[in-house]
Amino acid sequence: MPTVPGKPTKPLKAKLTALNDKLRRTGSTLKKLKPTIESVDTIKQRRVARRQASGLHFALADRIDFLNAEHWDRLAAASVFLSRDYLRVLEVHGPDNVQPRYAMAYSTGGQPVAIMLFQRVRITGDRLRKPGPRKLIDKPLARIDEHLLVCGNLLVWGARAYAFAPDADPQLLWHGVGEAMYRLRRADKLLGESDLAMVKDFAGGDHVAKDALRLLGYRHVDTDPDMVLTLKPAWKTWDDYLASLTSSYRSAAKRLEKDCTAAGIVLRVATAAEMHERHAEIQDLYYQVHHAQGLRLASLAPRYLASMADALGPERFVCRVAERDGRLLGFVTTVRDGDTAVGYYVGYDREANAGAPIYLALLQSTITDAIGFGVRRLSLGRTALEPKAKMGCKPEPMACAVRHRVSAFNWITTALTRTASHDEPPERSPFKAAADAPA
C-alpha cells in the first residue's frame, strides 16, 4: 500500500522519536555540565588573578615610623586606629603573639592610594578554648603552633585597618590588598610559614570587596554584626537620651543606675595617670571577661589601655570605672573615631556583677561619653546583642575573608565558612514615636 505523502512510516517515526529522546538527553546533560564548565572557567580566572600583579607600587615596613609619614597621614584620617599615635602604642604594648606589618600602595603616578595594617599572629592551642583542664583535647591542642597573617587589627572591629583614596578604583585596591598580603607572607617566610591569610573586617554589603577577594581565592564569611546606636542631634545630655525612650525602657535604664547606687557602687571617669597607677587591677578585671571567651587570638598587654589614654588624650579616649569603697569593680573605655564613638574594652568583677548590674551600667555609660564627644554614632561591637538592642542599637552586617596558602586546601576554608554561624540580633524599639518625642 502506498504511503501518504508527509506522513512518516512507523519505522521512520520510531527513529525520529529515538532521535528526539537522544537530543533531549544531550540537552539535559549539557545543562548539568554548564555549572561545571562555568566553575572551571572561574577557577582559571582566579588562577590568573592570583598570579597577576595589580600594577600598584608598594612600600612595606615592620614599623610605622619607617614609612613616609606625610603620605600615610593623608589617608590615615579615616580612623584613629590608623593614626601613628595609636600604632606606636600598638607596637610597644600590643599582644605578645602579634607582630605588626604595614603596607602603602602607590599609583603609577607616585600618589599614595591605600594604606594597610597587617598583623602576623602566632596561634597556639591554649588560645582556642577557655582555660581549664580538658584531658581529651589537651594533647592535640598542645601540638597547635601556627601563624596567621591578617589584614586587620585583632584588637578592634570594623574597617579600621585599611583606608583607600576616594578617587581610586576600589577593585584595583582590593587586588592590591591581596598582593601586599602575598608579598608580606613571602617576606616573612624565614620566620615561619603563614598558612592562613585573613582580611578583617569589611561591610557585609560591600560586594566589590567580596568579588575582588573571591577572585584572589578568598572565601568570605559573614560574622556577627556591629551593634550601632545612631545619636540624635537633640541629645545633648544623658537626660535627653532618657527622655527619648518609652516609659518601660526609660525605667529599666534608670533602674540600672539605682541598683548600682544601692550596692554602694559609683561610676566615674579615670585619668590616664590613674590607669597607669592601677593597671594591674584593670588588667585583672579585663582577664575575668577575656578568659570566659572560647576563642582568644590576642590578649591585651597590661599597659595597652593606659598607653592609649596617654597617646589619644581625653578628647579621643575616656575610661569610666565602677568603684566601691576604693576598690575597682569594673571599667569601660570609649574611643572617638571620627564621627563614631567606639565602646571599646570592658572588664568587671564577675562575682560583684552577680549582685549588681555593673556590666550593664558601664555599657550604657558609653552613651554619655559618645554624646560628650559630639559624634553621630556609637559602635558597640558584636557581643551582648540583646542589651545593646534594648539601648536602641541596630545591627550593621560585617564580613571577613580567608584563604589557605595552598590553593588545593581551600576546600577546608570553604567548608568552614559554610558551617560558620552567627547570632541574629533581636528586634527592639525602645524609642518613642516621632510624634511623642520631646521638641
Image: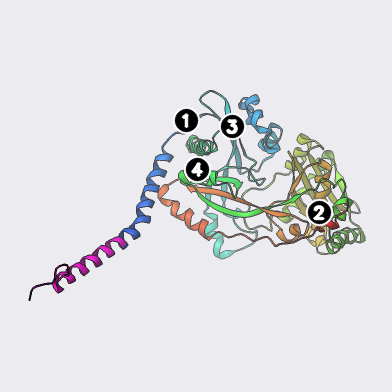
In this picture, residue 153 sits left or right of residue 214:
right
Mark 2 vs mark 4: in front: 4
Q: Earlier in the sequence, mark 3 or mark 4?
A: 3
Inspect the magenta stretch and tell me whether residue 348 lies in it.
Answer: no
Which residue is at a point 79% across and 54% down the rendered structure image? Answer: 363
Using the numbered discs, state the Cα–Cα distance from disc 3 to disc 4 in whole angstroms.
Answer: 18 Å
Q: Earlier in the sequence, mark 2 or mark 3?
A: 3
Looking at the picture, how far across and down is residue 11, in whole percent?
Answer: 14, 72
| Residue underneath mark 2 | 364
Q: Are marks 3 and 4 in contact (CB under 8 Å)?
A: no
Label 3 is placed on what type of residue? Asp
Using the numbered discs, state the Cα–Cα distance from disc 4 to disc 1 in whole angstroms.
Answer: 15 Å
| The label number, if any, that marks residue 55 in the structure image | 1
Q: Which region is colored magenta?
A: 1-27
Q: Earlier in the sequence, mark 1 or mark 2?
A: 1
Using the numbered discs, state the Cα–Cα distance from disc 2 to disc 4 in whole angstroms.
Answer: 39 Å
Using the numbered discs, state the Cα–Cα distance from disc 2 to disc 3 in whole angstroms.
Answer: 38 Å
* Other residues around mark 4 within 10 Å, as few (<14) / some (14–19) / many (≥20): many
Residue extending furthest toward the bottom: 1
| Residue underneath mark 3 | 167
Using the numbered discs, state the Cα–Cα distance from disc 1 to disc 2 in whole angstroms.
Answer: 48 Å
Secondary structure found at label 1: loop
